[in-house]
Image (cartoon, helix red, strand yellow):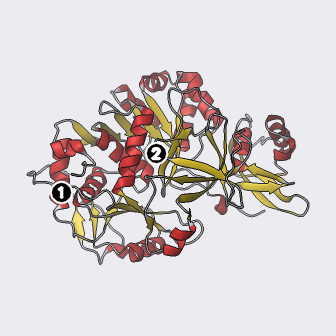
């Protein structure tokens, strides 16, 4: 017999499961609401979920999982062209939405299933599907072409959540607070399904606010999930001597940041004010979670930790040769294998085949390995690996060095063609004070002193703001060309 993804949903516990603002459901109420919808979903098809940050999205996702029907979370801010591509590619048989949601014209032809959040009469839940049954089809950001549908099986969801539980000591006693979007794996799989698998509770803020984080952590929440933009705002508030926030963060058992690297100076400001450090982990849509810092380990600056249980991880050179050096300096592409991986890119056997080297998935992320096996991400192979003067340089470490300068608020680093060096390092800087930006030479010297002379930026460009996506990641392809 297959083990249920959510044992407490099956058992119908009276404990609180999910809360969005003032609305909440116990496990028994969630089972009744989601179970009722599960029996209405078309067997053998797929369903789209209009994934607003709401209780209805959580109920709809659980309903699809109970029914064994693959769910396609839709970003409500997706443009018409991208939405049309996703719908044509995934061909959902229906769309789940909150009763009051106004849906775009592209969804008008689909049967609509309004998601109730009142418990209603509990019905018997469907039998547990096979672990290989697709759970979600999550679309990539489409930076190098039309978004690809990543097919995530139930097996990958369970394996990742159980490995994180082992790494973080995550139990049913934990209460998670976050404000992450629910159309990405970070917010939906980790942030909603994670607590439900453990038998704990999730409190979603709906919209991120420092005050909301402080309120929930002061009211019994034990874990916080966020992205660097959120932690930067927390660090700024702590810098204003917000003692209530500092005390709330001290009361948390675990602070986790993901989706992009958290700058070292924000790490340091939060630790200095609270005595707590933020744990980073590394994953992607196709792999769910690969590594994490272990809370009990001494911090290693810039590290995303060690591989999770069951995750095989290696670095390879450009010719595919495995890099055996664990010196913290040799850069290679991360490849991973294990039961946490996706099944395929929907309708794209060519892309699926190209993404694998045998059993190993090519992540496209560049990193180094420390002697202790700690992974340090230095950037994406396509946008963050700079080959300058015969050196392979990761943009991430230069960005961290720039952010350590008091005159820099935000920073991004890219490479541009150079007739002498091959590529020159370009820094894009948002000054802390727009009226007095730090000089380019000063920033170059600052980086050279912290890292090495060959890693200093040759060009500095100043911006009012860096382009970011919904998860706070800098979109380097959107930077203006010099």
Q: Is residue 242 placed above or below 78 in the rendered structure?
A: above
Q: Is residue 321 left or right of residue 342?
A: right
Position of the C terminus, as image quadrant, is bottom right
| Within-10-Å neighbours for mark 2: few <14, some 14–19, many 20+ | some
Residue that label 1 marks: 127
From where the camera sits, is residue 74 visible? no
Q: Which of the pair 258/371 is nearer the observer? A: 371
Q: Is residue 354 placed above or below 370 in the rendered structure?
A: below
Q: Could you say where residue 104 lies in the image, as x and y percent from the top left?
A: 36, 71
Tell me which label, 1 or 2, sits earlier in the chain: 1
Residue that label 2 marks: 310
In this view, the mark in front (1 or 2): 2
Q: Could you say where residue 77 lies in the image, as x and y percent from the top left?
A: 44, 62
Q: Is residue 361 placed above or below 271 in the rendered structure?
A: below
Q: CA distance from mark 1 to mark 2?
A: 27 Å
Q: Is residue 427 left or right of residue 3?
A: right
Q: Could you say where residue 273 lies in the image, as x and y percent from the top left?
A: 56, 23
Q: Residue 38, which numbered label?
A: none
Q: Residue at x 49, y 21 (%)?
A: 243
Q: Residue at x 32, y 51 (%)?
A: 54
Q: Which of the pair 371/237 is nearer the observer? A: 371
Q: Residue at x 57, y 33 (%)?
A: 236
Quarter of the rendering containing residue 44 = bottom left
Q: Is residue 34 left or right of residue 454?
A: left
Judged from this view, the residue extending furthest toward the left is 121
């Amino acid at each position: 017999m297959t083990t249920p993804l959510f044992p407490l949903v099956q058992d119908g516990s009276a404990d609180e499961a999910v809360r969005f603002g003032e609305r909440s459901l116990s496990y028994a109420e969630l089972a009744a609401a989601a179970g009722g919808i599960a029996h209405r979903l078309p067997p053998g098809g797929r369903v789209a979920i209009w994934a607003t940050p709401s209780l209805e999205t959580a109920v709809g996702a659980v309903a699809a999982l109970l029914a064994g029907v693959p769910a396609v979370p839709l970003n409500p801010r997706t443009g018409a062209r991208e939405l049309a591509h996703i719908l044509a590619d995934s061909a959902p048989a229906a769309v789940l939405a909150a009763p009051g949601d106004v849906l775009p014209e592209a969804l008008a032809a689909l049967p609509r299933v309004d998601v109730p959040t009142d418990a209603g009469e509990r019905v018997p839940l469907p039998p547990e599907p096979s672990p290989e049954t697709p759970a979600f089809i999550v679309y990539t950001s489409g930076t190098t072409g039309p978004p690809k549908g990543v097919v995530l099986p139930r097996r990958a969801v369970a394996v990742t959540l159980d490995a994180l539980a082992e790494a973080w000591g995550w139990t049913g006693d934990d209460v998670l607070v976050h404000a992450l979007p629910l159309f990405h794996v970070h917010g939906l799989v980790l942030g909603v399904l994670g607590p439900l698998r453990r038998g704990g509770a999730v409190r979603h803020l709906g919209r991120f606010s420092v005050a909301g984080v402080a309120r929930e952590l002061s009211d019994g929440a034990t874990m916080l999930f966020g992205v660097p933009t959120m932690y930067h705002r927390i660090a700024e508030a702590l810098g204003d001597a917000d003692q209530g926030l500092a005390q709330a963060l001290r009361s948390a058992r675990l602070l986790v940041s993901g989706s992009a690297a958290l700058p070292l100076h924000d790490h340091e400001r939060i630790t200095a004010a609270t005595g707590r450090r933020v744990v980073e982990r590394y994953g992607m849509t196709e792999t769910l979670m690969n590594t994490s810092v272990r809370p009990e380990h001494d911090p290693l600056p810039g590290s995303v930790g060690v591989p999770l249980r069951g995750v095989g991880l290696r670095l390879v050179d450009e010719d595919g040769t495995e890099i055996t050096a664990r010196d913290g300096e040799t850069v290679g592409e991360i490849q991973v294998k294990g039961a946490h991986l996706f099944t395929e890119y929907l309708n794209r056997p060519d892309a699926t085949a190209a993404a694998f080297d045998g059993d190993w998935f090519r992540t496209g992320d560049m990193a180094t390995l420390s002697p202790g096996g700690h992974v340090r991400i230095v950037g994406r192979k396509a946008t963050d690996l700079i080959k300058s003067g015969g050196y392979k340089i990761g943009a991430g470490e230069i960005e961290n060095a720039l952010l350590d300068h008091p005159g820099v608020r935000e920073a991004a680093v890219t490479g541009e063609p150079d007739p002498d060096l091959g590529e020159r390092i370009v820094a894009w800087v948002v000054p802390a004070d727009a009226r007095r930006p730090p000089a380019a030479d000063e920033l170059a010297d600052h980086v050279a002193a912290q890292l090495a002379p060959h890693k200093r930026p040759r060009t500095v460009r100043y911006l009012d703001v860096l382009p970011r996506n919904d998860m706070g990641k800098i979109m380097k392809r959107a930077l203006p060309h010099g």
